[in-house]
């Protein structure tokens, strides 16, 4: 069962509004656009797990998105936490740009 569903982080709305309202030539425009781009990519990465999560037994597993737990004076943050009676799974999602270079065709 999905106990805590995935939601669009409020920072995405905030960065998008700021990005649209700042003049294009503003000194922070590039930084804000890059931060927005990275956060959107992270959110899309977490969304990409929806199909795989739909395959697990909803009665046996508890699924929590975007978990933030206090540990002393610090916090631990997990993209996805899956609990069952036998184990706990912590998933961190990363989207990395990959380039493939194909070798030239073989000629004899």
Image (cartoon, grey):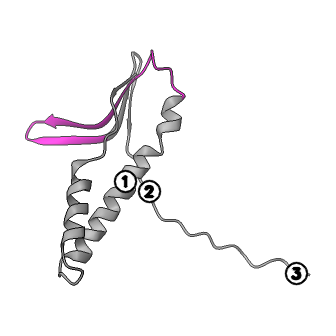
Percent coordinates x, y for residue 54 in the rendering: 51, 30
Q: Dots 1 and 3: beta carbons under 8 Å?
A: no
Q: Which residue is mark 1?
A: 42
Q: State the SS at label 2.
A: loop
16 or 73, which lies in front?
16
Q: Which residue is mark 3?
A: 107
Q: Mark 1 and mark 2 in contact (Cβ < 8 Å)?
A: yes
Local crowd size for mark 2, using a 10 Å CA cut-off: few (<14), some (14–19), many (≥20) = few
Looking at marks 2 and 1 on the same chain, the residue that comes earlier in the sequence is marked by: 1
Q: Residue at x 24, y 80 (%)?
A: 24
- The answer to whether 60 is drawn above or below residue 6 in the figure is above
Q: Is residue 55 above or below residue 98?
A: above
Location of residue 63 in the rendering, given as x and y in whole percent from the top left corner: 37, 28
Residue to which mark 2 is pinned: 95
Lower position in the chain sequence, tag 1 or tag 3: 1
Q: Is residue 61 magenta?
A: yes
The residue tagged with tag 3: helix, strand or loop?
Answer: loop
Nearest to the observer: residue 35 or residue 10 = 10
Of labels 3 and 2, earlier in sequence is 2
Q: Quadrant of residue 30?
A: bottom left
Name the residue nearer the viewer: 59 or 93: 59
Relative image position of residue 56 (x, y in whole percent):
51, 25
Asked if 82 appears above or below 42 in the picture, the reply is: above
Q: Choose mark 1 or mark 3, whichever is in front.
A: 1
Q: Where does the magenta region start and end?
A: 55-78
- The residue at 56%/69% (across/down) is 99
Q: Quadrant of residue 2?
A: top left
The secondary structure that dominates the magenta segment is strand
């Amino acid at each position: 069962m999905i106990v805590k569903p995935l939601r669009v982080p409020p920072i995405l709305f905030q960065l998008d509004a700021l990005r649209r309202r700042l003049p294009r030539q503003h000194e922070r425009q590039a930084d804000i656009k890059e931060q927005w781009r990275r956060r959107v990519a992270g959110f899309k990465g977490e969304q990409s797990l929806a199909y795989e999560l739909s395959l697990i037994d909803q009665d046996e597993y508890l699924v929590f998105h975007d978990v933030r737990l206090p540990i002393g004076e610090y916090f631990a943050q997990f993209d996805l936490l899956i609990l069952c009676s036998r184990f706990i799974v912590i998933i961190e999602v990363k989207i990395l740009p990959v380039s493939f270079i194909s070798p030239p065709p073989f000629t004899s």
